[in-house]
Image: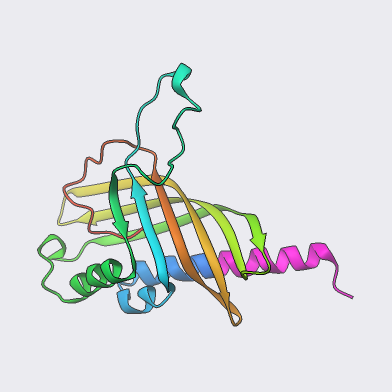
Amino acid sequence: MVSQIDKQIERQFRVEQFLYREADLLDSWEWGKWFELFTEDVRYWMPLRRNLQRRERGTGQLPTGLEMALVDDDHTQLKMRVQQMSSGRHWAEDPPSRCRHLISNVVVVEEDEAKQELVVRSNFIVYRNRLEREVDIWAGNREDTLRRQGDSFRIASRTILLDQNVVLSKNLSVFF
C-alpha cells in the first residue's frame, strides 16, 4: 500500500526532474524541444517590479496581471521568439551566449486533481556570459502551472518575478 507521503515524495521528484530537464534544454540551446513543454493556452509573463515603501507593502507587491511587463507572451509569441533564437540570425545572440539555469526551492503549493494541474513555485538564478566580458545574472522566482500529460507535465502558465526592478543587461534574449 502506497502512503500519502510516498505519493507526495514521488510527485515532488517528478516535478523537480521536469524543471531540471527544462533547464537543461535551455542550457543546451534546444529551443524547439523546450517549446514543446508548453501548452497551447500558455501565458509566459514577466511583470515589471516596483520598489515599495514599507507602508505600501501589501497594496500591490504581488502582481495582479494588469501590470506592464518585460515579457507577456502567449503560445504564438513564444513560438516566434523560439524561432528567432533558433534561426541563427538573432543579432543579440551572435555569437551565442553561454547560459546556466539553476533551479531550487521547488514547492508544490496547490494541486487541482480535476484539472490535472499543479501550481509550483521555484527560485532561479540565470547566469549568462556573452562575448568576452559581458556577464548578466538574474535571480528571482517563478510560479508555474503544470498540467499533467501522461507521465510528465506541460507548462500552462509561467509568472517570472525578477528580484530587480531595473534590468541592467543589454538585452533579454534569454528564457527563464
Range covered by the magenta-colored residues: 1-17
> What secondary structure is the stretch in magenta mostly built from?
helix
Is 126 located above or below residue 58 in the figure? below
Foreground of the two, 17 or 65 = 65
Which residue is at a point 40% across and 58% down the rendered structure image?
101
x, y percent for residue 7: 76, 68
State the image quarter where residue 119 is shown: bottom right
Image colouring = rainbow
Residue 147 placement, left or right of 64: right
Which residue is at a point 24% across and 55% down the rendered structure image?
129
Is 103 located above or below residue 55 in the figure? below
Where, quadrant-wise, is the N terminus in this rendering? bottom right
State the image quarter where residue 147 is shown: bottom right
Within the magenta stretch, is there residue 126?
no
Q: Residue furthest right?
A: 1
x, y percent for residue 112: 65, 63
